[in-house]
Image (cartoon, grey):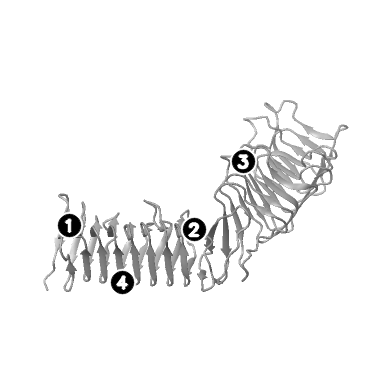
């Protein structure tokens, strides 16, 4: 704990003579305090004063493993960390770094360099400044495999990530900050966070070139309020996919004029509750149309427009919505291959049309309600499974070539369920599956109306 001055004649103020056995578990430099260069493993760091390495790195944590010094404790800087070195100002760091002060290298070296292998995490808060006169402000090339960067301040210099194959993925979010330099990423599946401002170019906060490198890289449009996207979205070099991440309580709408650049991933961006995505556009895809991510904030998705795919992969649904809590279709979905897959203990509601050459709709642990049309021209219309406490109901049309409905949960029917093949099955009851056919309900039109598992399957036709 320092509030005075620590210095050394060589420029090194704090030295771990044997980095494998010795280091600094915690360094606190208070406002007004000054420390020269630090060489050795560092656990916790809280700097509100000045750490000046001079011609040395301000802090070189070394690449030597030390089991006695935790490398995962946050480093926090609200003061000044500086050097005029050919090496990095912060060198070989593996601890998460939070900066609201100033980190500079006025020499030829980098400002911040990761140690690796692993993931370098840097949060540059509002008012934080990271500057390298030599050109590269942040480098995850020093054996580090990936970079997680959230920048709400200013970074002057390039941001680079190692290009090795099989590395960690990177996430770069400077949408509320500024990077005056180029961003070059590695071989992971990287994500670049951006805002939409009504034009085709996403707002990234990066005033230089952007190169996603190898991997499957995505631009994530994050929204904090209701947003309508009614233009094409142009992706930077090396990026081929689009993510949509509406904040909790907000709706992101795809309107006429929007053109899908490729597969769209729906991402929940809130805490326990994601926002909603609505498609009002006519979208065409050559492969998979939508997929989703489910962490702690599932998103809701409504299709009120049209979604068409011209090609598909065996076993891969055109709309893989297992990270979507509520799916509603009031429009049309027409796909080659498997159609829609839903799960997450949510709801699936269809009053539109879902047509696929494979299984049209697969629902696991969902409350399914169909008042529209679900149709497979080459397979199963509707496949239901999961918790028997999540029932399904049909008052519309469900039609499959081989099977209309395959179910291991309760299905109530007041509509029509058909299999079009002569040897088809309208309703196939698996273990625990049940069919309740209400007044007006029609099951079968040629082939077999109902088949049942030998284990806990039931058919009921209530008094009419």
> Which secondary structure, mark 3?
loop
- Give the mark toward the camera: 4 or 1: 1
Q: Earlier in the sequence, mark 4 or mark 1?
A: 4
Whole-Å distance between the Cαs marked 2 and 4?
Answer: 26 Å
Viewer-side label of 3, 1: 1
One can see residue 46 in this view: yes
Q: Which mark is residue 372?
A: 4
The first of marks 3 and 1 along the sequence is 3
Can the viewer see residue 365 in this picture? no
- Residue 145's tag is 3
Disc 2/disc 3 C-alpha distance (Å): 26 Å
Above-or-below relation of 90 to 420: above
Q: Secondary structure at mark 1?
A: loop
Mark 4 or 3: the one toward you: 4
In the structure shown, which secondary structural element does the residue marked by tag 2 occupy? loop
Query: Marks 3/1: CA distance?
Result: 55 Å
Which residue corresponds to mark 2? Answer: 263
- Which residue is rendered at x = 72% and y = 25% of the image? 18
Q: Determine which residue is flagged by label 1.
A: 423
User: Answer yes or no: do the residues labelled 2 and 4 have beta carbons within 8 Å?
Assistant: no
Q: Pinpoint residue 16: horizontal percent, then vertical percent.
A: 74, 29
Going from the N terminus, do you reach mark 2 or mark 3 first? 3
């Amino acid at each position: 704990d320092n509030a005075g001055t620590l210095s050394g004649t060589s420029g090194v103020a704090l030295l771990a003579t044997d980095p494998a056995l010795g280091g600094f578990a915690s360094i606190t430099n208070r406002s007004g305090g000054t420390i020269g260069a630090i060489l050795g493993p560092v656990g916790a760091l809280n700097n509100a004063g000045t750490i000046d390495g001079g011609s040395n790195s301000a802090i070189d944590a070394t690449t030597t493993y030390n089991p006695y010094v935790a490398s995962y404790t946050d480093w926090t800087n609200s003061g000044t960390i500086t050097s005029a070195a050919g090496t990095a100002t912060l060198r070989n760091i593996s601890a998460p770094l939070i900066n609201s002060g100033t980190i500079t290298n006025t020499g030829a070296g980098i400002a911040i360099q990761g140690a690796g292998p692993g993931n370098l995490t840097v949060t540059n808060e509002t008012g934080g400044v990271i500057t390298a006169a030599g050109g590269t402000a942040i480098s995850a090339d020093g054996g580090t495999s990936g970079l997680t960067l959230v920048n709400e301040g200013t970074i002057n210099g390039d941001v680079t990530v190692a290009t090795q194959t099989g590395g960690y993925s990177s996430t770069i979010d400077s949408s509320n900050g500024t990077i005056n330099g180029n961003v070059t990423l590695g071989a992971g599946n990287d994500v670049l966070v951006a805002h939409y401002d009504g034009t085709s170019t996403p707002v990234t906060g990066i005033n230089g070139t952007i190169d996603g490198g190898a991997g499957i890289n995505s631009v994530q449009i994050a929204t904090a309020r209701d947003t309508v996207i009614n233009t094409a979205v142009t992706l930077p070099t090396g990026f081929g996919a689009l993510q949509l991440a509406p904040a909790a309580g907000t709706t992101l709408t795809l309107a006429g004029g929007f053109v899908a650049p490729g597969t769209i991933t729906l991402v929940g961006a809130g805490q326990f509750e994601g926002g909603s995505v609505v498609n009002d556009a006519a979208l065409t895809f050559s492969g998979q149309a939508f997929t989703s991510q489910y962490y702690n904030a599932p998103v809701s998705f409504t299709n009120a427009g049209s979604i068409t795919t011209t090609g598909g992969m065996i076993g891969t649904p055109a709309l893989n919505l297992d990270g979507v809590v509520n799916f509603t279709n009031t429009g049309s979905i027409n796909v080659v291959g498997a159609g829609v897959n839903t799960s997450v203990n949510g709801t699936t509601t269809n009053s539109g049309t879902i047509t696929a050459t494979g299984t049209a709709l697969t629902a696991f642990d969902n409350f399914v309600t169909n008042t529209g049309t679900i149709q497979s021209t080459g397979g199963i219309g509707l496949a239901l499974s999961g918790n028997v406490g999540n029932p399904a109901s049909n008052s519309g049309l469900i039609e499959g070539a081989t099977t209309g409905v395959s179910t291991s949960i309760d299905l109530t029917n007041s509509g029509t369920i058909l299999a079009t093949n002569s040897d088809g099955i309208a309703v196939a009851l698996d273990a625990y599956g049940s069919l309740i056919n209400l007044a007006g309900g029609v099951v079968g039109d040629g082939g077999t109306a109902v088949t049942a598992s030998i284990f806990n399957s039931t058919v009921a036709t209530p008094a009419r």
